[in-house]
Image (tube, rainbow, N blue to C red):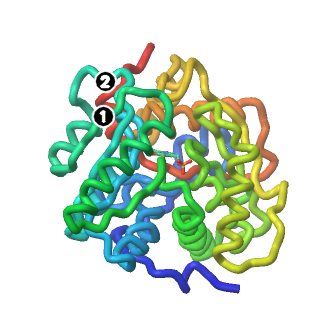
Amino acid sequence: MKTIHDFPRLHLAVGPTPLHKLENLSRKYEKNIYIKRDDLIGVGLGGNKVRKLEFLLADAKARGADVVFTTGGAQSNHAMLTAACCRRLGMEAVLVLKKRGVTEEKGNLLLNRLLGAQVHFVDTDRYSVVYQEMHRLGEALERQGRTPYYIPVGGSTALGALGYIAGREEAYGQGEAMGVHFDHTICVCGSGGTTAGVALGTQYHSPGTRVLAIAVDDDPFEEIVPRLMGEALALLEDPSPVRSDAVEIQYHVGAGYGVAGAEDTAAIREMARLEGIFLDPVYTGKAFAHFLSLLRAGYFTGENLLFVHSGGAGGLFAVDLPE
Ligand SMILES: *Cc1c(COP(=O)(O)O)cnc(C)c1O
């Protein structure tokens, strides 16, 4: 069996991200609520994708790649962070994005331009069409002697998921140093890689902690997450079976992926006003809204709760927040 430390990894995160208690929210909801600040990871505007990219881009480097292709929605945090990380490494990023709904260059699209990333839009809703275009562009570069590396949407592969095993090792180590055992870890699920990594990392580093993933789009994560967990276990040559109780997945999609509702705005506002921390409208704000509704309903049995802030601030400047 291997551990994540047997895999090539680039240290893109600037040190361990902070983990601290949310004092005002803890008082209000009568629980000890902690937050893992992967929004402060130190590249771009921060976010969970940097942890995946530490492994994915190390693999790209090892394969001699000089140009990295990835994809996502127009406001993809993953695409922007891929471009930012590539800049650190002196590599070029090509972002092949779904065009749907784009009218202005705001939020992450503005950041992509500042980063000097090449952006190609594909006018489709289907990723199969996007990947076709990505490979067509990549093959054209190959004919010019370049070496492309392809990262699928969200960086949600087994290798990417190792980043969140690393993230859990870091977080539970911080908890231990503070003398805190977390009863629950709460994370956002968007393409599944983070959840798969959090579930496995929790199994390895804090087996008594229950994992709750809050899905913000309606893909079948009950299938996607266990599949990614199985692939990551295979990569680690860990013969353990995927445990069905490793993670609970709940959905909070509202009117659709990327469309915030009034309760999401209220949750973003509550975090800003009580703790001075900004959540994002697509992922963390929605997950936090659901988390607050569970707190109000008395869902959590344990006292110590850890919410993973996976970043996304760029989205605040691109998405409408309904009152
Ligand atoms: C991508 C993203 C997520 C979801 O992570 P997945 O690994 O795609 O499930 C959560 N929060 C933010 C801010 C993200 O950008």
Residue type at mark 2: give it: Val
The picture places residue 170, in percent across and down from the top left corner, at 54, 72
Residue that badge 2 annotates: 102
Q: How crowded is mark 2: few (under 14 residues within 10 Å), some or many (20 or more)?
A: some
Decide if residue 277 is in sight here.
Answer: no
Q: How many labels does the image show?
A: 2
Q: How crowded is mark 1: few (under 14 residues within 10 Å), some or many (20 or more)?
A: some
Residue that badge 1 annotates: 121
Q: Residue 273 carries which label?
A: none
Tell me whether the residue at label 1 lies in contact with that at label 2, contact meaning CB atoms closer than 8 angstroms: yes
Residue drawn at x 64%, y 49% is 186
Q: In which quarter of the image is residue 73?
A: top left
Where 101 falls versus 149 (above or below)?
above
Q: Is 50 left or right of 68, judged from the image as shown?
A: right
> 263 or 78, which lies in front?
78
The picture places residue 183, in percent across and down from the top left corner, at 74, 57
Image quadrant for the C terminus? top left
> 316 or 200, which lies in front?
200
Residue drawn at x 70%, y 61% is 229
The picture places residue 173, in percent across and down from the top left corner, at 59, 75
> 102 or 26, which lies in front?
102
